[in-house]
Amino acid sequence: MKKILITNANIVNEGKITRGDVYVKDGLIYIAGGDLKEYEADIVIEGEGKYLYPGLIDDQVHFREPGLTHKADIYTESKAAVAGGITSYMEMPNTIPQTTTLELLEQKYSRAAETSLANYSFYLGATNDNLDELLKVDPENVCGIKVFQGSSTGNMLVDNPETLEKIFSECQLLIATHSENDNMIKANLEKYRAEYGDDIPVKFHPHIRSAEACYDASKEVVDLARNHGTKLHVLHISTAKEVLLFDDRLPLEEKRITAEACVHHLWFSEEDYEDKGTLIKWNPAVKTKEDRDGVLNGLLDGHIDVIATDHAPHTFEEKQNNYMSAPSGGPLVQHSLVALLELYHKGKMTLEQIAEKAAHNVALIFEIDKRGFIRPGFHADLVLVDLDDPWTVSKDNILSKCGWSPFEGTRFRSKVTHTLVSGHLVYENDTFHEESKGQRLRFSRKNILDKIG
């Protein structure tokens, strides 16, 4: 692999910003910090005035392959991801067929090895009757198990209380949950259908998939995890009330229960339905300004631990349907880092907090081997950004296969200029170098291996 030297950058890493160089050799960070210009390099990247981040790790994406590739696929969405500064992702099981067996899981890994420009891992999906399959997972090779408490795209609802109890008591691997109370949602939906039929105004989406439905389901799994000592990660927290379910006192390394916030819940509020309509229809729903601010505050004070996207493309035509027919989800990986940097420009987050929540903490929670930090010996997943190079999102520069974005028309002040994935310069000033692919993520989970013998 080529030797790469990044010079004069502002290195954002482990709570500090330091000026210096980073030298990459054999795909790894060889030395970080100081003046390293005496090292021989095949590629020199001038970082003067720019900020160097560890590559973002997105723990929740839907890349739609197999079975839904008219919306997206692993190649197109990983390309959008690296252009947005995401160097590793963990992809969800609600594809066609659903990824609920080890055989189907390995087929995804094989496909990613052929086409993914970013590093990758895939969740094994839980159902009401596949516990035996869940218990066979190799904890060093798979990011986690996904449990849907609320029915969403692909409907993999786990609604049997006995099944949930067994999953939480017997699975040693991290369990990630989509937590919404399905019965509450159905009751709310019937109420609005009685008044509006199938033509429900989209502004009522956060009332149908309500704050109460989110809180009830999140509390259920948090209680289960506490009872059984389960490693639990609750995805896409969308309400201020849910935030207090999580501990802000323990160091991250001691937490068994963690939580995630998503970019869209930090950016949009229910006022945006009037302009954006079904383009911002997500599950869980975008809710009030108070919920948006509560989630951000929870992220900053330590109740919520990581930031992700829940990138979930659908075609523009599908999203233009009425409320009942329009699917939930939207593309976000290309714009997540620049959106977070916009929050920095507005004084709502620090540059260091972005690195902590979008890279460091994800690596720590999932126990990813040698990624998520700018450290010697770690894989060279690196992102260089210019904080002052404004650009506007338009159809001409959207890379996701679906061809649209909820950020279309938004002018971002910051821009990703270079992305390294496992030591390969894959993205450079709007140009891609695709001769090398991403790597399968590995996990350092000796504690789990000791427990299962």
Image: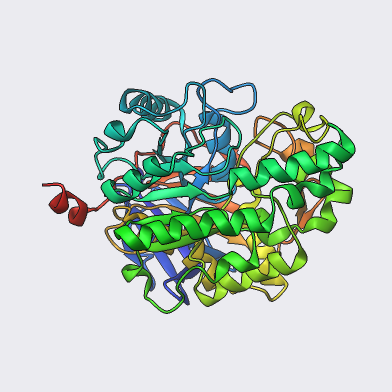
What x and y, as percent, mark residue 11? Answer: 47, 69
Residue 215: x and y, percent? 59, 59
Question: Residue 333 placed where, x, y %?
Answer: 60, 46
In the image: residue 52, left or right of residue 202: left
User: 444 or 328, which lies in front?
Assistant: 328
- Residue under the point 58% across and 46% down: 310
Q: Is residue 253 left or right of residue 5?
A: left
Most foreground residue, 282 or 86: 282
Percent of width and height locating residue 70: 64, 21
> In the figure, is residue 270 to the left or right of 428?
right
Q: How many marks?
A: 0
Vertical arrangement, residue 102 with respect to residue 147, above or below: above
Pick out the residue farthest to the left. Answer: 453
Q: Which image quarter holds the N terminus?
A: top left
Residue ID at (59%, 69%): 49
Name the quadrant containing residue 320: top right
Quarter-wise, where is residue 142 in the image?
top left
Residue 45 appears in the rendering: no
Q: Mark yes or no: residue 256 visible.
A: yes
Q: In this orientation, which residue lies closer to the viewer: 287 or 74?
A: 287
6 vs 280: above or below: below
Q: Give the colour scheme shown.
A: rainbow
Residue at 38 percent across and 76 percent down: it is: 250
Q: Nearer the viewer, residue 332 or 436?
A: 332
